[in-house]
Amino acid sequence: MVKFQPFSGTVTMIADFPISPNGENEGCYKMFSVNDESGRQVNFVVEPRTYFLDNVMVAIGDRVTGYYDANAPVPMIYPPQYRALVMVKETPYQNVKVDFFNSQLVSSDGTLKLNLSPNTRILLENGQAFTRSPANRNLIVVYGPSTFSIPAQTTPYKIIVLC
């Protein structure tokens, strides 16, 4: 099971990331260096399958959150290098949570509960409508305000189902 772990910061470098010695797929993989406010650095390997919320273009200087699988093996190097599963460019008044949501639509860490409305758009990664229940799935949840309760409750603007 994927355990989505976020790391937020400012993009300080974007470069090609070679994956084979013969140059096959050259330019298809990128390395994003991201530094947080305390100076910690993480390098994200961005591959063609990395999901970028709203298909935004990320540039040096942008604030982003990269999500990686905390259960996946990683090389023991510094700075840490993770395979980016989801990248989110920060946008004012928009919150994003990437996690597994159970049958009650509560995140796996117990911090967010979703209250669906008829206005909540539920989509697949390719932008097509998802017509089933989003419960018991990995989701990208885009929302605005939430309650101060535990767990916080929100009515999301959009949900992307990670099939």
Image (cartoon, rainbow, N blue to C red):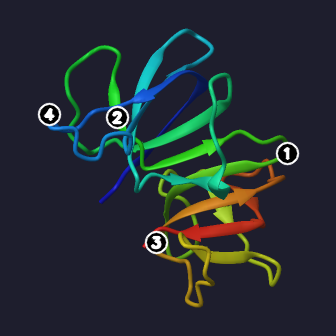
Precedes in sequence: disc 3 or disc 1: 1
| Residue occupying the point 85% across, 45% down | 93
Precedes in sequence: disc 4 or disc 1: 4
Query: Which numbered marker is on residue 21?
Result: 4
Precedes in sequence: disc 2 or disc 1: 2
Please tell me whether residue 38 is drawn above or below residue 131 in the rendered image.
above
Precedes in sequence: disc 3 or disc 2: 2
Considering the image in quadrants, where does the C terminus appear? bottom left
Query: Which numbered marker is on residue 82?
Result: 2
**CB contact under 8 Å: marks 4 and 2:** no
Question: What residue does disc 1 label?
Answer: 93
**CB contact under 8 Å: marks 3 and 4:** no
Precedes in sequence: disc 3 or disc 4: 4
Quadrant location of residue 5?
A: top left
Question: What residue does disc 3 label?
Answer: 137
- Please tell me whether mark 1 sits on a helix, a strand or a loop: loop
Precedes in sequence: disc 4 or disc 2: 4
